[in-house]
Image: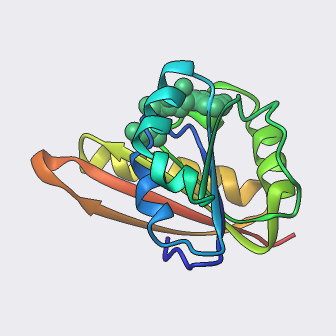
Amino acid sequence: MAVTPDDQVLEIGCGRGSAVSLVAEHLTNGRIVAIDRAATMVRLATQRNLSHIDAGRAEIRRAGFESADLPTDHFTKIFAVNVSLFWLGDAAQQIARIRSLLAPGGRLYVFGERPTEAHATANLAATEVLLETHGFATTTSSATRGQGQVLTCVIGTPIR
Ligand SMILES: C[S@@+](CC[C@H](N)C(=O)[O-])C[C@H]1O[C@@H](n2cnc3c(N)ncnc32)[C@H](O)[C@@H]1O
């Protein structure tokens, strides 16, 4: 994601908060807001990131993405890792909301871990089609990790 010190970052579905730590390390004036609808995950993510929260670089909140109180036209980077954001609910609504929260020039990063290359390819293709249908330009990347696990990422930039 090439996080820069001034980035305003939103993570959807932060789980235990390991990505929050990785992002917050790069921030100075910027800030990461991370949400998760599960109270246990918010507690664990908060414990893990106390120093970043105390320094004002991170905020972790219990909220569902659909109803979270978030500023519009604000985030330079929005990301999610292994969250079924588009596949369980109303994808059009979710994507419209992401678009409204992105600052001009902002980007969406959809990460996923898949057990095989075939699963990864299918996941990348489905996410690309979905985002392009809703007015995003996309690029994709993937990297094989241990035991054949593949980490995929679709980057989406609003074009209309
Ligand atoms: C599979 S876990 C992944 C957690 C973390 N991103 C990771 O990669 O370790 C998915 C997380 O997303 C949260 N989640 C799923 N849908 C959400 C939504 N619509 N709003 C907020 N959190 C959500 C779940 O509570 C869960 O903690």
User: Depth check: 104 or 113 in front?
Assistant: 104
User: Depth check: 52 or 117 in front?
Assistant: 52
User: Depth check: 49 or 72 in front?
Assistant: 49
In the picture, the quarter occupied by the C terminus is bottom right
Colour setting: rainbow
| Residue 48 placement: quadrant | top left
Left or right of residue 143, residue 84 in this image: right
Query: For the image shown, how many numbered marks are present on the structure?
Result: 0
Task: Work out whether 22 lies above or below 96.
Answer: below
> x, y percentage for residue 46?
50, 37
Residue at image x 82%, y 56%? 101
> x, y percentage for residue 72?
89, 56
| Residue 76 placement: quadrant | bottom right
Residue 87 visible somewhere in the drawing: no
> x, y percentage for residue 90?
76, 30
Left or right of residue 148, residue 106 in this image: right
> x, y percentage for residue 52?
51, 55
